Image (cartoon, rainbow, N blue to C red):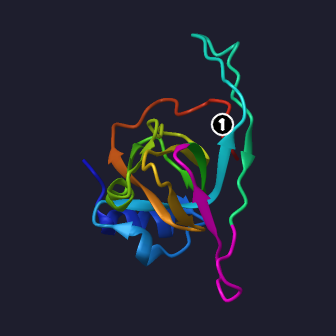
Amino acid sequence: MVLNKQQLREKIENKGLVRNYVDLETQLTPQGFDLTAAEIHSYGGKGRLDFSNTEREIPESSKIRPEKQSEEDDYAWWELDQGVYKVVMNEKVDIPNNLTGLAFPRSSLLRMGCTINNAVWDSGYTGTGSFMLHVENPDGVSIKENARLNQIVFLDLEETEEGYRGRYQED
């Protein structure tokens, strides 16, 4: 079962399912939660992936500095050319062992010629996530700091004995 807005609000306010959000009311959706952009990075090398992850290498990335369009702006803009970028979100999640998350690009982003790739958000994962932004529009895209880009949907599941234990787990 997908959690609805009321269930999400309860788990966010009372259980800390999502923290460091910009504005709870704006980010809650009828059956999900909008994740916002804190940083955007460009990739600077190639990665390596094997079966056991013993030879896994995540490529370096460099923060792209957003720029204010006017001095009155509270937030700055990233001007992105066509390409692939890593987005680090503002929010930190603390997913209990009886939930999992699936995330999808917001439809507004799709209408601009951009999409997002996500992995499954495992039960037991705690941390600040990142996702891959594809800018397919030949003219690029402008994204403002804290823009809502990605929507995560949480699903109930039978509690697992052991949740996520990978290298990206935060305390």
The range drawn in magenta is 67-83
Say which residue label 1 marks.
168
Residue 60: x and y in percent read 74, 34
Residue 155 in view of the camera: yes
**Residue at 75% in and 45% down:** 62
Other residues around mark 1 within 10 Å, as few (<14) / some (14–19) / many (≥20): few
Q: Does the magenta segment cover residue 134?
A: no
Q: Does the magenta segment cover residue 78?
A: yes
**Image position of 102 (left or right of 75):** left
Disc 1 marks which amino acid?
Tyr
**Image position of 104 (left or right of 47):** left
Element on which disc 1 rests: loop
Q: Observer-nearest residue: 100 or 37?
A: 37
Query: Is 74 rendered above or below residue 28?
Result: below
**Image position of 95 (left or right of 2):** right
Please name the predominant secondary structure of the magenta segment in the image: loop
**Residue at 39% in and 57% down:** 109
Q: Observer-nearest residue: 41 or 96?
A: 41
Q: Observer-nearest residue: 85 or 48?
A: 85
Most extreme residue toward the front is 139
Number of numbered discs:
1
**Residue at 72% in and 35% down:** 44
Residue 162: x and y in percent read 52, 30
Residue 83: x and y in percent read 54, 42
Query: Is 105 rendered above or below residue 4?
Result: above
Quarter of the image where one finds residue 51: top right
